[in-house]
């Protein structure tokens, strides 16, 4: 029997609020199944189970704010059975001392306990789960306009998903003070505990842009590849050749990762930043990488990330996009050990085959944890990245 506990969803997390259970006692669960939704500063996060079995007992109430590591549920492993309830022992009976009779008092009716009754909803309120109410407030959706699929017609989080794209177009987000505090705490921890060093290189990406134009010529806009997908692929292939930059450093010990889970820094509407991971990006094609990026960014901005995407990143990419500064030296997301910072592409005079020609270039700055790597290994990573971007057909 295992304890399903409140997971840590980042270096900045101390507690989370349980807003929705997606399982009940008796349900079968498997590794990777989403079993609950927890609200943190980063939004509503889908929490995954990391073992096979069946749910024996839910030990946390909806709305409870619990610290990392607090038990949420008990899960029986395959083949295990629920333990027999222990019969309480009869207390020893002591001899009762004689007590003088009390004086008679006026009869008073005794309170008779009755069955517990749930507090009724306010008059006219629409029945909905706590997570659905929270998401509806964020999106500005009137619950009275939504059809519920839960018990007695209650509205669940899934019932709002179809309404999110329209709602997000008109959504206005309040200042995200809690998220900014969380980001500040994580970055302070990073700079105080990780000895950063930085290597930069300006890279010619003209061949990559020409290759993209050819690949995208006959595609619909929704299916076109973006430069960011090539950056992710180049990062994954380079990390496979230089494993000292791919993994996590926990309690002073570096744990290199067999998989390359590239974290993608995503700016949220209204402010704030998250860096969910594209799991096993090293095994994806360019088209699969592009589809994964679109899905990850959409869910990050809708507050529908999974716990594994926030905890299993092994190297992160942060790009300023098409418009912005020429270079960026980023702060490593602990417990990772490296971050790829990419400035905005710029048109610059460049020497090609002895002639000066206009070329599109981008400046890459690699932030590295000096406890687990050094300048020679970081330089190898940049060289591998540059080689793949110069030959995009290898991606």
Image (cartoon, rainbow, N blue to C red):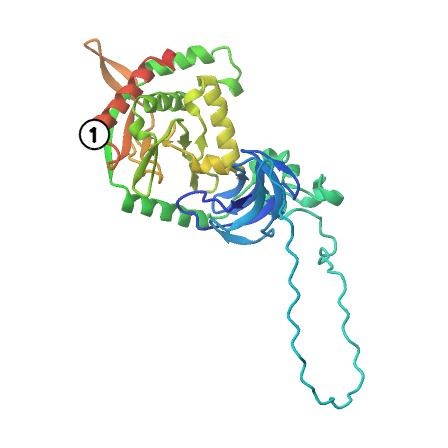
Question: Can see residue 365?
Answer: yes
Tell me residue 287's x, y (percent). 47, 18
220, above or below 144, in the image? above
Which quadrant: the N terminus?
Answer: top right
The image quadrant that residue 338 belongs to is: top left
Residue at the image point whose x is 61% and y is 34% from the top? 166
- Mark 1 — residue? 375
In the image, 50 versus 178, the foreground residue is 50
Q: Residue furthest left?
A: 354
149, above or below 342, in the image? below
In the image, 3 versus 167, the foreground residue is 3
The image quadrant that residue 371 belongs to is: top left
Horizontally, residue 153 falls left or right of residue 240, namely right
Residue at the image point whose x is 34% and y is 28% from the top? 344
Tell me residue 13's x, y (percent). 43, 48
Tell me residue 300's x, y (percent). 49, 36
Q: Residues within 10 Å of mark 1 (few under 14, many from 20)?
A: few
Which quadrant: the C terminus?
Answer: top left
Tell me residue 274's x, y (percent). 43, 38
Q: Residue furthest top?
A: 353
Horizontally, residue 98 falls left or right of residue 214, namely right
């Amino acid at each position: 029997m295992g304890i399903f506990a409140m997971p840590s969803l980042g270096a900045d997390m101390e507690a989370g609020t349980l807003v929705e259970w997606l399982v009940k006692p008796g349900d079968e669960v498997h590794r990777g199944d989403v079993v609950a939704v927890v609200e943190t500063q980063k939004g509503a996060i889908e929490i995954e189970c990391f073992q096979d079995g069946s749910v024996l007992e839910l030990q946390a109430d909806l709305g409870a704010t619990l610290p990392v590591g607090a038990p949420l549920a008990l899960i029986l492993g395959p083949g295990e059975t629920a333990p027999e309830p222990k019969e309480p022992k009869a207390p020893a009976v002591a001899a009762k001392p004689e007590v003088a009779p009390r004086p008679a008092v006026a009869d008073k009716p005794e309170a008779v306990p009755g069955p517990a009754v749930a507090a009724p909803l306010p008059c006219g309120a629409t029945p909905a789960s706590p997570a659905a109410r929270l998401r509806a407030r964020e999106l500005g959706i009137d619950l009275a306009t939504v059809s519920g699929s839960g018990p007695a017609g209650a509205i669940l989080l899934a019932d709002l998903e179809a309404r999110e794209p329209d709602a997000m177009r008109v959504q206005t987000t309040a200042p995200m003070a809690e998220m900014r505090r969380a980001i500040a705490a994580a970055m302070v921890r990073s700079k105080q505990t990780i000895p950063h060093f930085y290597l930069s290189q300006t890279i010619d990406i003209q061949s990559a842009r020409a290759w993209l134009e050819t690949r995208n010529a006959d595609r619909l806009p929704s299916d076109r590849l973006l430069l960011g997908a090539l950056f992710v692929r180049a990062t994954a292939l380079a990390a496979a050749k230089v494993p000292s930059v791919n993994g996590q450093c926990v309690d002073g010990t570096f744990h290199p990762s067999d998989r390359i889970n590239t974290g993608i820094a995503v700016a949220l509407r209204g402010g704030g930043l998250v860096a969910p991971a594209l799991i096993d990006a090293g095994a994806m094609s360019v088209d699969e990488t592009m589809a994964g990026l679109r899905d990850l960014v959409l869910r990050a901005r809708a507050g529908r990330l999974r716990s594994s995407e926030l905890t299993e990143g092994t190297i992160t990419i942060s790009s300023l996009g098409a418009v912005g500064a020429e270079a960026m030296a980023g702060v490593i997301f602990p417990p990772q050990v490296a971050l790829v910072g990419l400035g905005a592409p710029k048109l610059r005079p460049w020497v090609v085959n002895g002639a000066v020609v206009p070329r599109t270039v981008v400046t890459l700055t690699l932030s590295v944890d000096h406890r687990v790597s050094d300048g020679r290994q970081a330089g190898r990573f940049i060289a591998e990245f540059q080689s793949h971007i110069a030959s995009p057909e290898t991606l």
